[in-house]
Image (tube, helix red, strand yellow):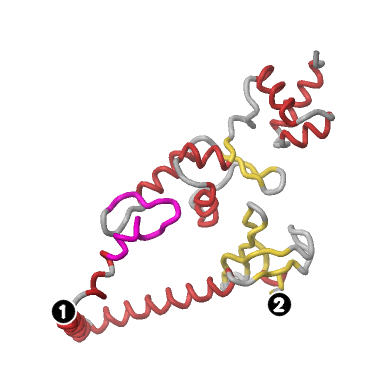
Amino acid sequence: MVAQDRLDTMDRMRQSGTSLQQIASHFGITRQRVGQLLAKHYGSTRIQDLLTATELARLAGCTQSYIDKLQRRGVIQPAKVVGRGRTLWKPETTSTVTIYVDSHRCRVCNRPLPSNRQVYCCWACYIDACRYKNRPEQARRRQRESVAKWIADHPEQARQIEQRKQTKYRAKKSAERYQNTEYIIWRKCLIPLSTIVRVPSYNKATGRIKVEWGDQVVELPFGCVRRVVN
């Protein structure tokens, strides 16, 4: 028979965000036993009816990496971050993820995109979208002539389109350069010193960067990191 004060302590620790393993280590019992006691006396092991990232992905019908991607993009934000960057989510976030998934559809067949794709749902749709490359030379020449005529008739619009294209290209190359490079924390900040991190984005206007630290995305001054030279 477990004393009621111990059960109340377990429940308070759980609701404050402590993991089952940490509670088990505190009381010297197994993680499974903690889960059994909380489920028996309090009905559930959840934290204030919040969902883990795994549960959110299962209810929304996507992968956990897709949830992480939406979090990095700022589409959704966790209700609480506990432990080593473990995220907890409100149940209503499920509908937000579902709506986002349904609104992003394949450019060719208009079907919802799988969580591991961004533009086309399958290889066949990609081939169909690239059919211009497979056209005969005569058809491609007519297409080029039509584009050249439109540019000549609309020089200002063509210049704006080219500027937007160059801006997107430079932003993409800049993002790839930061994302493919490892950085180390070398100034005192929220993240411990000498921690290896990745930088998904850098805002030159504010001089701040977004750093991936475990499951968290933390915003820091750019001077807090230094590139790791191999």
Q: Count the labels in the image.
A: 2
The image quadrant of residue 147 is: bottom left
Q: Measuring 77% from the left and 32% from the top, which residue is drawn there?
A: 23
Q: Quadrant of the N terminus?
A: top right
Which mark is first along the chain, 1 or 2? Answer: 1
Q: Measuring 20% from the left and 85% from the top, which residue is drawn there?
A: 148
Residue 79 in the image: x percent, y percent? Answer: 59, 41
Q: Measuring 39% from the left and 44% from the top, which residue is drawn there?
A: 99
Residue span colored magenta? 110-127
Q: Is residue 175 left or right of residue 37?
A: left
Disc assigned to residue 139:
1
The image quadrant of residue 153 is: bottom left
Look at the numbered discs 2 and 1 and tell me whether their residues touch, using CB distance below 8 Å. Answer: no
Residue 201 in the image: x percent, y percent? Answer: 57, 67
Can residue 153 be spotted in the picture? no
Structural distance between the alpha carbons of marks 2 and 1: 49 Å
What element does badge 2 sit on?
loop
Q: Residue furthest top?
A: 1
Q: Is residue 178 left or right of residue 170?
A: right
Disc assigned to residue 196:
none
Residue 58 in the image: x percent, y percent? Answer: 50, 39
Q: Measuring 22% from the left and 83% from the top, which residue is drawn there?
A: 151
Q: Quadrant of the C terminus?
A: bottom right
Q: Residue 127 or 185: which is nearer the viewer?
A: 127
Disc assigned to residue 230:
2
Kindly identify the amino acid type of the residue bearing the numbered disc 2.
Asn
